């Protein structure tokens, strides 16, 4: 299962031209987040299942990479801000990754 997750992350990282250092850092962080002991549904198994669905329907998707990124970040972290939804918090982390990519370019 983790090999599939790693392969999907590496493919999208390569498509986005993420450095191997940054890609490895973000993959380790993502795996760590989805492996947190308090998680019962939004786990690596959930990520794996969604990646399998995205692969199954890849030919029907306009932007498969965007869907893969959404899979990785949709439940990335629990919000520590009382007015943010989990999805807004995931978007916050996606923006952090975007800044990392922009600064690396």
Image (spheres, rainbow, N blue to C red):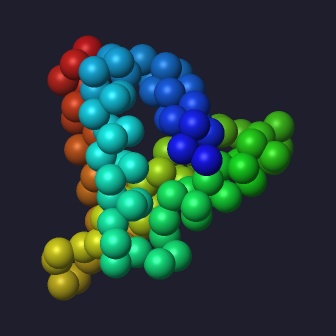
Residue 4: x percent and y percent?
A: 62, 39
Residue at point 33% right, 41% down? 28
Q: Tell me the residue at 39%/61% (across/down).
A: 35
x%, y% of residue 42? 49, 70
Camera-nearest residue between 39 and 55 = 39
Q: Nearer the viewer, residue 26 or 86?
A: 26
Q: Is residue 51 left or right of residue 40?
A: right
Left or right for 63, reference 76: right
Q: Within the image, what quadrant is residue 103 found in?
A: top left
Q: Considering only vertical position in the picture, is 57 above or below 19?
A: below
Task: Left or right? Give the position of 55 relative to 73.
Answer: right
Q: Residue at x 50, y 27 (%)?
A: 10
Using the image, determine if residue 58 lies above or below residue 18. below
Write down the quadrant of residue 98 in the picture. Answer: top left
On the question of residue 74 being in view, the answer is: yes
Residue 102: name its quadrant.
top left
Left or right of 66, for residue 93: left
Residue toward you, 45 or 57: 45
């Amino acid at each position: 299962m983790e090999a599939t997750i790693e392969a999907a992350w590496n493919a999208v990282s390569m498509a986005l031209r993420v450095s191997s250092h940054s890609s490895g850092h973000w993959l380790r962080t993502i795996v760590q987040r989805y492996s947190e002991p308090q998680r019962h549904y939004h786990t690596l198994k959930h990520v794996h299942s969604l990646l399998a669905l995205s692969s199954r329907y890849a030919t029907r998707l306009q932007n498969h990479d965007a869907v893969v990124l959404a899979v990785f970040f949709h439940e990335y972290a629990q919000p520590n801000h009382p007015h943010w939804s989990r999805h807004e918090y995931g978007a916050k982390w996606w923006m952090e990754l975007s800044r990392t990519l922009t600064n690396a370019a």
